[in-house]
Image (spheres, rainbow, N blue to C red):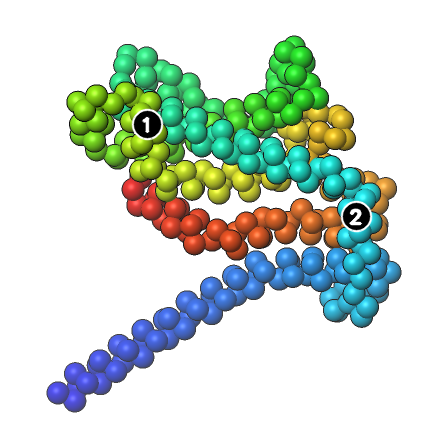
Amino acid sequence: MSEMIKETKLQKALAAVGRGAVYIVMSLFALMTLYPIFWLIMNSFKTTREFQVSQLAFPRAPTLQNYVEAWKMGDFGLLFPNSVLYTLGATAGIIFLSLMAGFAFAKLKSRATKLIYNSFVIGILLTTQTLMIPLFLEVNLLGLYNTRLAVLLVYIGAGLPIGIYLATEYIKAIPSAVVESARIDGAGFFTIFLKIIVPMSVPVATTLAMLNITGLWNEFALINILVSKTELKSLPLGIYKFSGSLSTDYGKQFAALTIGMVPMLVFYMIFRKQITKGVAAGAIKG
């Protein structure tokens, strides 16, 4: 009996050690992730001279002047609303069209379904670099260069391959009997899509929103070839200004980077529970 008690205590002790090791490793990873963000924000309140003297110390006289000047010099007053429009508009388009196409590919079978589906999914293999010249020529040919519509269309098109793939695989798991019973009750396909498929696809829609919002907010390469007018550019292009003649003005450079980063941090802090639930549910369902 005493041996069993000792063995139980040993098992509990080993389990506690294992949990402690896991917590230590996770804490180290969290520290490695958070410290660069903290370092960037901390140094954004320093003058360039103070940063050059001491890069790791806390600012002796914190100043908001870097943010004021970075906002003006980067034209962020114009670019910030553009980034919001491009990010939210393209994300909404990607989610809606991906769910619609996923519903068709998963539940409305025809001879052409497989061919069309594969033609979409193959887009996952294409890199941004391979598409830049064709997209630039096509946008010019259509007369859409220097328009917000061109940016939105290109962003939506770029996000559809992975979006359609995830949506199709998720909707396949929804019982076909649900669609068939709705058809028997006289519902049309569009009604079924809006009232049945969309509500049941919230987890995968959340996953797509998370992937696209973070990606589109920071997108630089495509919009750089689609627009040249300042009033049509996005935040990353404004931040890019600080890598040229202002590359040694570290205070303003760090302030500009922080301005571009903070909205994504706020987005995650507000929607972290929904993001976690959506990703987990999407992974389990898929």
* Whole-number angstrom distance, CA of label 1 to CA of label 2: 46 Å
Q: Which of 171 and 82 is in front in this view?
A: 82
Q: What amino acid is labelled 2 in the image? A: Ala
Seen at 44% across and 69% down, the residue is 23
Q: What amino acid is labelled 1 in the image? A: Phe
Q: Where is residue 135 in the image (x, y as percent from the top left)?
A: 61, 19
The answer to whether residue 169 of the structure is visible from this angle is no
Q: Position of residue 214 (x, y in %)?
A: 55, 42
Q: Which mark is residue 125?
A: none
Q: Are marks 1 and 2 in contact (CB under 8 Å)?
A: no
Which quadrant, please, contains the N terminus?
bottom left
Asked if residue 114 lies left or right of residue 44, the reply is left
Q: Residue furthest left?
A: 1
Which mark sits nearer the N-terminus, 1 or 2? 2
Which quadrant, please, contains the C terminus?
top left
Which residue lies under the disc numbered 1?
Answer: 193
The answer to whether residue 15 of the structure is visible from this angle is yes
Residue 10 quadrant: bottom left
Residue 108, compared with residue 261, is above or below; it is above
- 10 Å crowding of disc 1: few (<14), some (14-19), many (20+): some
Which residue lies under the disc numbered 2?
Answer: 70
- 10 Å crowding of disc 2: few (<14), some (14-19), many (20+): many
Element type where label 1 sits in the image: helix
Residue 140 quadrant: top right
Total numbered circles:
2
Q: Where is residue 171 in the image (x, y as percent from the top left)?
A: 30, 32
Seen at 45% across and 38% down, the residue is 208
Residue 34, compared with residue 57, is above or below; it is above
Seen at 32% across and 18% down, the residue is 114
